[in-house]
Amino acid sequence: MANNDSTQRTLLVAVILCIVCALVVSSAAVLLKPAQVVNKALDRKANILAAAGMLIPGESIEAQFEQVTTKIVDLRTGKFTDDVSLEGFDQAKVAKDSDTSIALGDDDLAKIKRRENYAMVYLIGKEGDFDKVILPVRGYGLWSTLYGFLALENDFNTVVGLGFYQHGETPGLGGEIDNPKWKAMWPGKEIYDDGDVAIQLIKGNVDSSTPGAVNKVDALSGATLTSRGVGNLLQFWMGELGYQQFLNNLRSGEA
């Protein structure tokens, strides 16, 4: 009988301990969620500024972000819209909703399945005379979807910077998209050639003697599929189903 009591007490203590631990973990998750949301928003802003070459380490990200204007673009028309509120806008949710996105089918070069009708874009400068535009881009690499930002000069063609803030690519291979040396190859490259999307990643070293060098960037060594994924996502997002119409409207002042 004593042994049974001992076993029951052990099980009771174990159950109580599990319940207490579960309550502590769940309570911590609830209490920390607001801070996590704030930190996630700050990280996003930092990555936007970094893509535009404007992030100053050690200074307030919020203060630096005051120079950024955020707008919603209707990708079907390539124009700014007030039909969708900036407050609470979640582009990922918009992309998953069949009422606010389109299925891509054979046009799914970036392997994202659906393209949202509305996108949040970021602009530097005055209305009608923007200095830079920062565009969210995404697409599948080898193991994961790559989420990043592409920043363009006010010709809406020349790259200021490209950076990815979320991915699950292999460290040392596809993960080299985070390498500052590789990211430093992008500024000055051009997306379009005579109106066509021309940017691409190629094997070998791109230098001034490479034909069409302004539209080419070194592929990642040993990461063919990740490199292909980056090239494909840029082809898609800079094309007709992405931001091309919007960028054309910005150039003509009709956005």
Image (cartoon, grey):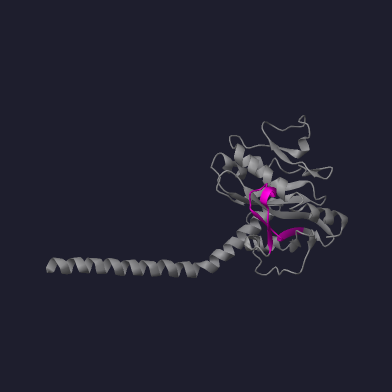
Which percent across, then down, holds residue 218? 68, 36
Quadrant of image for the N terminus:
bottom left
Q: Is residue 220 above or below residue 73?
A: above
Q: Nearer the viewer, residue 115 or 201?
A: 115
**In the image, residue 97 lies at what x, y percent?**
64, 63
Task: Provide the residue span drawn in magenta.
Answer: 100-123
**Of the pair 212 and 183, the residue shown nearer to us:** 212
In this image, 239 relative to 32: left or right? right
Residue drawn 78% across the image and 54% down it: 132
Residue at image point 54% right, 68% down? 34
Residue 76 locus on image (x, y percent): 77, 59
Residue 160 is covered by the magenta coloring: no
Left or right: 111 as drawn, with respect to 118: left
Q: Splitting the image into 4 quarters, where does residue 24 fall?
A: bottom left
Res 88 quadrant in image: bottom right
Q: Position of residue 207 (x, y in %)?
A: 74, 32
Q: Residue at x 78, y 35 (%)?
A: 212
Residue at the far left: name it.
Answer: 1
Residue at left 77%, top 41%? Answer: 198
